[in-house]
Image (spheres, helix red, strand yellow):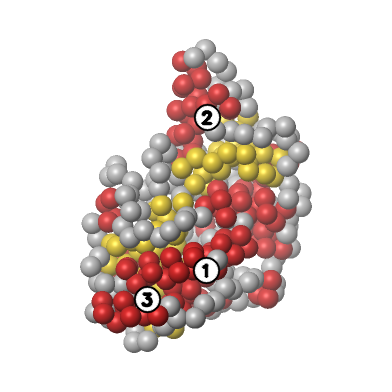
Amino acid sequence: MAISKKQGIAIGVGALALVAVVGGVFTAVNLNNDEPRGDAAAAAEPVEANTATDEIQWFHIDPVPEAVEALEESGFTPAQAGKLTVAIGAFVPPLSYQPEDTSAASDVAGTEPNLGSLIAEGLGLEYNPQVVAWADWPLGLQSGKYDLITSNVTVTEERKELYDFASYRKDLLGFYVKSDSKIDSITEAADISGLKITVGSGTNQEQVLLAWNKELEDAGKAPAELQYYDDNAAATLAIQSGRVDASFGPNATSAWSALETGETKLVGIVSGGWPLTADIAAGTKKGNGLIEPVSIVLNSIIEDGTYTELLEFWGLDSESVTSSEVNPAGLPKS
């Protein structure tokens, strides 16, 4: 199994860190819990870890005058003067992770921390990242301990009652197959008939497959065979060895694996809020005046191409948006 230095963290160090946060199988994003989840109970093969932060590219911008002006007029008061205190996670590439041999929050890399730093730069503030557990960010924003969160948060109608959001990515699930597989498209129930597919138990993606299987069975066709593995490494091996036909899970981590190893490919995308669409967004305490300036910065980096370069570097260009929207429609209350 070919594993790059950076991916070694996703399967090794990152997976171990995740267990302390929450149990489960596969790295997953659920409808009501966007925190990456992992289970390191099954031993993975030793992998080479990333030991040099210079392998990681950080993108930077100058202050965006319109955003700086909007921030000054908003009346927003940051938690620390002159700084934007951003809540981030340290979970798994490409979203956020702590590179080996580093310990500072400023070293946590990935799309989410870099978007947080770009927002701070665009607002003319110093980036002040704070690594937080998933359960702690809501109260942290409410109390004013953190100004903003950029940590793979899905917009929901329930969250919008307490927080303002500026969208920056699509919440997607992805079907991935071996790079030389003859399967080139999975977009509907008919495409999975008879296939063996790895999926995380109790996840949104499992619910999608169960719904599609019912559709197939009602039509008298063979359903897909769902297979459950204890960790990402085992699932990756299952695909590469041909024991399964495809994997179905959060697109971000699978896209990173495909980018780093070249041994899998994307053949289908489904919204993380299926059958509804869902947005990933930066969040802040509702009504504090910060979100409009944040959205201005996000739209600025979308327009100048910095945003595209960032997502392409981390293999997440499939999740890009054409503009940042303030408080977009969220997933309904469960």
Percent x, y for residue 168?
44, 59
Is 155 located above or below residue 140 in the figure?
A: above
Of the numbered discs 3 and 1, the one sitting upstream in the chain is 3
Please tell me in which quadrant of the rendered image residue 5 appears: bottom right
- Residue 85: percent from left, percent from top: 39, 77
Residue type at the position of mark 1: Asp
Tally of numbered discs: 3
Circle 1 crowding by C-alpha within 10 Å: few under 14, some 14–19, many from 20:
few
Q: Secondary structure at mark 2?
A: loop
- Answer whether residue 252 is visible to the viewer in this image: yes
Mark seen at residue 304:
1
Residue type beneath disc 2: Glu
Q: Secondary structure at mark 1?
A: helix
**Residue that mark 3 sits on:** 67
- 113 up-or-down from 271: above or below: below
Q: Are marks 2 and 3 in contact (CB under 8 Å)?
A: no
